[in-house]
Amino acid sequence: MFNATRKTLALLAVMASAGAGGAAIAGAAGDSGSNSSRGAQRSDEKPLTGDTAAKVKAAALARVEGGTVLRVETDADHGSAYEAHVRKPDGTEVEVLVNKSFEVTAVNEMRGRGDGPCDGPPTRGQR
């Protein structure tokens, strides 16, 4: 009887380990590596860290009052040095472009809930 109990416990342990490993793999596969709950970071844009990230966040939040920065990264498609993805208090999202001097050069409205590129031309100098 003890032998059957040990076999059952061993089988349950193996199954639990396999399930946990599968869940970890599935979670890793679903993670885009961005610090945003919406939208994916492009492979040619790199996350910002440290002092640079702090300055880009500050510039973006100075332009989008009451906003929440979702992620900050290098910019690969607008000609700016950096970009910040910001959720406005009304729930819409914008992409704030920032130059190397940490000055906001444009604010682009994001399509829908921030799922993709801007709908139209950028809104330069929006407040």
Image: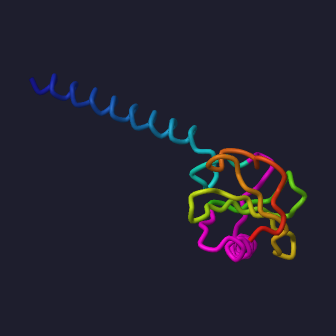
Instruction: Determine whether, in the image, residue 27 is placed left or right of residue 66.
Output: left
Query: Is residue 79 or residue 7 the one in the foreground?
Result: 79
Q: Is residue 4 above or below residue 95?
A: above
Magenta stretch holds residue 52: yes
Please tell me how many numbered marks the rendered image carries.
Answer: 0
Identify the image quadrant of residue 106. bottom right
Q: Is residue 110 above or below residue 55?
A: above
Q: Quadrant of the C terminus?
A: bottom right
Q: Is residue 39 above or below residue 85?
A: above
Q: Residue at x 71, y 52 (%)?
A: 110
Instruction: Determine whether, in the image, residue 21 is placed left or right of residue 81.
Output: left
Q: Residue at x 30, y 33 (%)?
A: 13
Q: Which span of residues is magenta-colored?
A: 42-69
Q: Picture coordinates of residue 121 (x, y %)?
A: 84, 52
Q: Residue furthest right?
A: 79
Q: Quadrant of the N terminus?
A: top left
Query: Is residue 35 or residue 61 the one in the foreground?
Result: 61
Q: Picture coordinates of residue 42 (x, y %)?
A: 75, 47
Query: Is residue 82 or residue 17 the one in the foreground?
Result: 82
Q: Residue at x 77, y 58 (%)?
A: 108
Q: Residue at x 22, y 25 (%)?
A: 7
